[in-house]
Image (tube, rainbow, N blue to C red):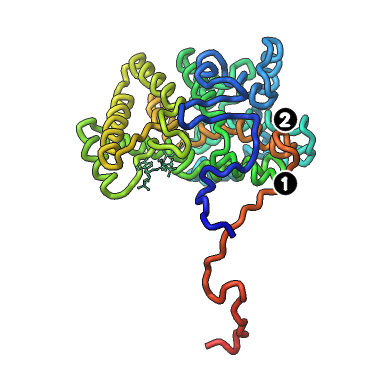
Amino acid sequence: MQETKDIGLRGILVADTKICAVDGEKGRLIYRGYNIDELARYSSFEETVYLLLYETLPTRKELEIFKETLASERQLPVGIIRHLKKRKKTANTMDVLQSVIPMLADFDSEARIETKGVNIEKSIKLIAKTATLVACWDRIRKNLDITKPDEKLGHATNFLYMLNGDMPDEETARDFDTCLVLHAEHSFNASTFTARVVASTHAHMYACAGAALGALSGELHGGANTQVMRMLFEIDNPDRVEKWINATLDAGKKIMGMGHAVYKTMDPRAKILSGISEKLAERTGNTKWFELSRKIENITRAEFKKRKGKEIYPNVDFYSPSIYCVMGIDPDLFTPLFAVSRMTGWCAHIIEEKFAEAQPKAVIYRPEAEYVGGYCGLEGCKYVRIDKRE
Ligand code: COA
């Protein structure tokens, strides 16, 4: 047994991947060789999905066809809508997603066909339908009529249209599209690793995606954005930031949306999201949430440095809440929105894992743990039958 353990697998290499590179020291994020700054500026969600699934940027024609294919998969099976209507209206959207995504397998006769081509088709279905599922569920729980997807609209515009029942303006749709690009992939984070572990057992894609959703829902991962909004609501007034941050740190609690397991400098996604949040605030005149977020960032960074002698930076979940809130999206949908986009990364990783695309062979994940349970050690305790036990 090795002497030291790498708790939480920090720094342990478990696989090779060709999908994404994260440079935590320099604050760089690369999808299939392309820098996130350029993708955020010039690409679209659909183009990013194409890049992640097909390993290359599409030509104009390929992108057009791909957009049509993705849009044609947006409809949910009637059986799923019927199921959603029977759910408790108070159900958490992440719980709904985690249970309903695997149900899509019931409606896919090819769910268990394990060729790469069919798995890409399943990926397209998963990416298209996750967006519809979130929008559809939100309207069902609010007793609103379901808005049918519109195949003529791009993914981001159509999602906002399905959610709100009316068309977003162009700039809002563009900002939301960029948010989707930024959340699409992030290497071996907890949910993606979960998806790959499940894929390594040869479970089908819907099962892998369902497992990843469970991992994403936790507040130390995708759930952080909802917690950030909760923090913004709780603080509410910029004059209260300093006292609130100090009290939270004094109590040994975390400031949500700050810090990262890999980035030891500014998360490049947070930098872009902060810019979007600032511009959106100026455009709409609703500057409250951006300004509050900026003050929380500044005070947390100063206080963290004072207390620990080191830097802490905002992560991807810090500025997205101030964007989504101004867009009129409910806070409990923030983590589901993360899933709407990250489904792409999960699918790319599930396929890479299943077809051993970056390493010589596919093996089931099986790390080791040291047994420290005491009792009678590895010798085992002497079993006493129940009638002889006091
Ligand atoms: N608030 C307060 N303290 C924090 C912190 C935060 N947001 N993030 C890290 N720290 C503290 C840690 O508790 C640790 O303290 P210690 O040295 O006294 O044990 C120290 O800073 C170093 O932490 P680090 O090793 O850099 O981070 P990690 O890998 O342990 O944790 C996260 C990474 C993301 C889990 C952590 O930063 C966190 O919980 N952030 C808030 C939740 C969040 O935003 N999650 C979304 C991530 S994308």
Query: In the image, is 189 to the left or to the right of 105?
Result: left
Query: In the image, is 305 to the left or to the right of 268?
Result: left
Name the residue at 24% across, 45% down: 247
Residue 116, compared with residue 90, is above or below; it is above
Residue 215, compared with residue 384, is above or below; it is above
| SS for dot 1 | loop
Residue 54 is tagged as none
Q: Nearer the viewer, residue 129 or 279?
A: 279
Q: Is residue 362 something that shows in the picture? A: yes
Furthest residue in direction top, as rendered: 60
Furthest residue in direction front, as rendered: 3
Q: Which of disc 1 and disc 2 is earlier in sequence?
A: 2
Question: How many neighbours does mark 1 have within 10 angstroms: few (below 14), some (14-19), or many (20 or more)?
Answer: some
| SS for dot 2 | helix
Name the residue at 21% across, 35% down: 240
| Residue identifier under label 2 | 120
Give the residue type at disc 2.
Ile
Q: Position of residue 317 (x, y in %)?
A: 43, 33
Name the residue at 35% across, 16% down: 284
Q: Position of residue 32 (x, y in %)?
A: 62, 24
Residue 363 is tagged as 1
Give the residue type at disc 1.
Val
Query: In the image, is 95 to the left or to the right of 326?
Result: right
Query: In the image, is 383 to the left or to the right of 362?
Result: left
Q: Nearer the viewer, residue 180 or 87?
A: 180
